[in-house]
Amino acid sequence: MPLTPSLRLTGKPCTTYSYTVRDTLTISLPGKTKRLVERAASESGLTTSEYVRQAIFHELWRQATLDSRRRAVPAARSRGVFTDEDVFRLIS
């Protein structure tokens, strides 16, 4: 459990306990891709690690959304729901 020194309002040091558990994933990238990621991270004001974490999260979210749509659309169509207006009519 890492200890992080910080200052209270009194200016006296205190200790903060961090309970964040992380695993490490090592990937290899071609040099050009690595430079592009580093540049994009820098331009975003993020560390390279945070930039990659966010990119992975957004891709996983996108995939989950597409999967939900793949499952929901056929079920909705079989019930006569084709447009936003159909959805609005059902929930109003």
Image (spheres, rainbow, N blue to C red):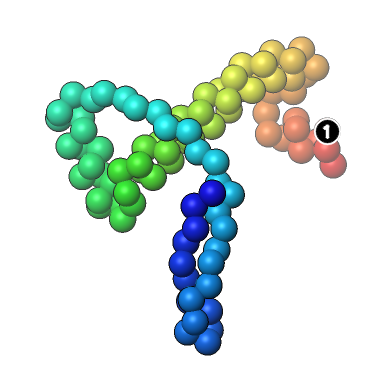
Residue positioned 55% across, 41% down in the render: 21
Residue 5 against residue 57 in the figure, above or below: below
Amino acid, disc 1: Leu
Q: Is residue 31 visible?
A: yes
* Closest to the observer, 51 or 2: 2
Residue 72 against residue 35 in the figure, above or below: above
Crowd around label 1: few <14 · some 14–19 · many ≥20 (10 Å): few
Q: Where does residue 56 sit, x and y in percent of width and height?
A: 43, 32
Q: Where does residue 24 sit, x and y in percent of width and height?
A: 42, 32
Q: Which residue is mark 1?
A: 90
Q: Where does residue 37 sit, x and y in percent of width and height?
A: 25, 38
Residue positioned 64% across, 23% down in the render: 68
Kind of element beneath mark 1: helix
**Residue 83 located left or right of residue 36:** right
Residue positioned 53% across, 84% down in the render: 9
**Residue 29 located left or right of residue 19:** left
Q: Which quadrant is the C terminus positioned in? A: top right
**Residue 68 located left or right of residue 52:** right
* Closest to the observer, 55 or 31: 31
| Residue 90 lies in quadrant | top right
Q: Where does residue 5 sit, x and y in percent of width and height?
A: 46, 67
* Closest to the observer, 62 or 33: 33
